[in-house]
Every structure is written in structure tokens, then in C-alpha cells.
Amino acid sequence: LATIALGRGGRYDVGIEREAGNGRADIIMRRNDPRYPNIVVELKKSRSDDPEDLEKMAEEGLRQIRTREYYRSLKGKTYLYGVCLQNKKARVLFEELDL
């Protein structure tokens, strides 16, 4: 994921494990061009491949972004992603903010 984020062709300033709000966000992509949204990603890893567990942990990722306000310094359209991974399975939840 980090490699993909870093290859965004100057559209973003990408921070990995960067201090933000009240903690450290896994990935923050601050837009350099107002046509694109800011992106905040919180990653979780599950030991279970139960779809309900993946869903709960992805929800926890979104909740963590909101409660720790990782988006505090961003302005404009911002996408929040809670991502839970378990081997080759993934669950991604999305939320959009207009800051």
C-alpha cells in the first residue's frame, strides 16, 4: 500500500506513520492539487478470516481516525479508509468528509 501511495505522481505529499491529531496515522496523503481529495488510511490486521471480524476491525480503523482526529490539519474533501487485512482477504470501509 505504501508503495502505491508513494507513486501518485506529485499529486500528494505522502506520510507513513506520521504524527497527526492525537496519534500516528498509518497513511496520510495530503493533496497538492485541490482537484483531488486528501486521504487518511488506518490499517488493521486480523488473525481471523471471519468476515464479521474483518468488518469490525475495519470499523475500528475508521473510528480510530475520527476519535484521534488524524485529519485535523487537512482542508477540503477528505476520504477516510478503515482497512482490515487477513492474508489475501481484505475489508475496506470508506467515509467522506468536507473539512
Image (cartoon, rainbow, N blue to C red):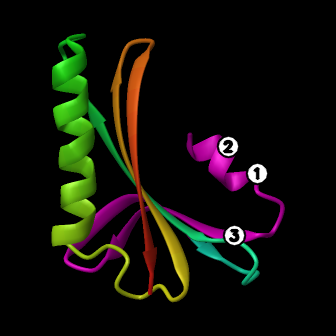
Q: Residue at x 83, y 61 (%)?
A: 9
Task: Write down the region rendered in magenta.
Answer: 1-29
Q: Is residue 56 left or right of residue 76?
A: left
Which residue matches tag 3?
A: 12
Q: Is residue 18 left or right of residue 31?
A: left
Which residue matches tag 2?
A: 4
Crowd band around label 1 with a 10 angstrom C-alpha radius: few (<14), some (14–19), many (20+):
few
Q: Residue furthest right?
A: 9
Whether residue 46 is visible to the viewer of this picture, yes or no, is: no
Q: Residue at x 27, y 39 (%)?
A: 58
Residue 50: x percent and y percent?
20, 12
* Disc ID at residue 76: none
Which residue matches tag 1?
A: 7
Residue 74: x percent and y percent?
47, 85
Contact check, label 2 and label 1, Cβ < 8 Å: yes
| Vertical relation: 76 (above or below) 26 | below
Q: Is residue 97 magenta?
A: no
